[in-house]
Amino acid sequence: MLGQYLLELDFGASRIMEGYGLADLPSVIGDRRAVVVTDDHLAQLYSAELSGYRQVVIPQADAAKNMAEIDRVLGELLAIGLDRSDVLIAFGGGAVSDVTGFVAAIYKRGIDCIYVPTTVLSMVDAAIGGKTGVNHGSLKNMVGAFKMPTHIFIDPRYCLTLEQENYQQGFAEMVKHGLIWDESYITLLERYQSSLMQRELETLAMCISGASRIKIDIIKEDSMEYGQRKLLNFGHTIGHAIERRQGLAHGDAVSIGMVGAMHISSQYCGLSEEDILRAAELLQGFGLPVIQQLRTEQFWDLLVKDKKTRGDSVDYVFLESIGTARLEAIEHTTLRTMLDEVYARVS
Ligand SMILES: NC(=O)c1ccc[n+]([C@@H]2O[C@H](COP(=O)([O-])OP(=O)(O)OC[C@H]3O[C@@H](n4cnc5c(N)ncnc54)[C@H](O)[C@@H]3O)[C@@H](O)[C@H]2O)c1
Ligand SMILES: [Zn+2]
């Protein structure tokens, strides 16, 4: 069942409109001027649908997520003469919404934006919750702003044109949402895994909706990420570090990171081996990797520089059982010991 609902956070609100796509933009844009920000791949692939819009085209994926690119986009918007009363549209995956949202936060001190996410990952995660930003050198998402798009259109039909590798990435975050919050969502993914892999649209729409509603449930109590919202970082402490070191896709890295975090959880807070096997099987069924290739010392330097680090400790997400996660600040030295022990045992 498609729906519309409002996500209200401390710093703004987004209307989430399921089943809406590019063709529905005019009704929301009204008489404002609009500029679409998209990447060079989507600009070509969806050239017919985008033809009526002024466009700013950025490179694909994380190649766009740097300050030089932000500066270039701002320059293009100034050249176009966009005003604060106009609107930016992000058409693309998480990299496009991260760049567009950040630009929207700072262009003339803030301009409205609308997100039209085009990947599974961005529909269930990146487009929702107002975090925007770019990387700094090899460090992920270090510079950015909180900015809520006024509207988020969720149209799973865009996922039909995704390459298989990109399609699969989003399932890592969907599995994550179930693992940390709702066991019944994991059961749903298990039940519908084969139709999801066949991109059966109704099932995809239902599972995307379920995952985004879980994210909303989690963040609405903690807009600024002081506590509960940090649960969404499950698997990302290891994940971000190996993503940068090995050049992995985000979902692949998070999948490996979650399995690592589950092994740590089994050692230190009683997660059962059964639960680990269940989660790993689900991830593998979505074509995601689960085996860690690197030794701890090969990614440790990146891990301690992560955003989740505070002084000598890191906010780490443990899983007690599928559906129940726990956040705890642990010292770097303790985490290092845990990682060394766990990877010595499982590799
Ligand atoms: N802000 C947040 O809360 C948040 C959360 C999670 C991830 N992210 C960020 O999102 C980024 C990853 O985003 P992503 O995986 O959604 O994709 P992406 O923007 O990195 O794009 C990946 C590739 O998919 C292509 N693509 C996108 N949509 C397509 C479609 N419909 N058909 C064909 N090809 C398509 C793009 O052209 C690109 O080549 C990372 O930079 C990550 O840090 C942000
Ligand atoms: Zn993620």
Image (cartoon, rainbow, N blue to C red):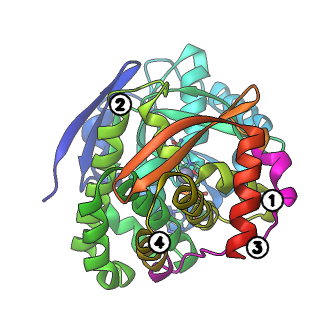
| Numbered badge on residue 273 | 4
Label 2 crowding class (10 Å Cα cut-off): few <14, some 14-19, many 20+? Answer: some
Question: SS at mark 1?
Answer: helix
Disc 2 element:
loop
Residue appearing at x 41%, y 26% in the figure: 223
Q: Decide whether residue 60 is among the magenta residues.
A: no
Residue count near mark 1 (Cα–Cα under 10 Å), binned few <14, some 14–19, many ≥20: some
Residue 150, label in figure: 2
Distance from disc 1 to disc 2, alpha carbons, whole Å, reads 42 Å
Q: CA distance from mark 3 to mark 4?
A: 21 Å
Query: As shown in the figure, which amino acid type bears the numbered disc 1?
Result: Thr
Residue 293 is labelled as: 3
Bounds of the magenta segment = 283-303
Q: Is residue 99 above or below residue 81?
A: below
User: Quick check: marks 3 and 1 in contact, CB under 8 Å?
Assistant: no
- Amino acid identity at mark 4: Glu
1 or 4: tag closer to the N-terminus: 4
In this view, the residue farthest toward the top is 109
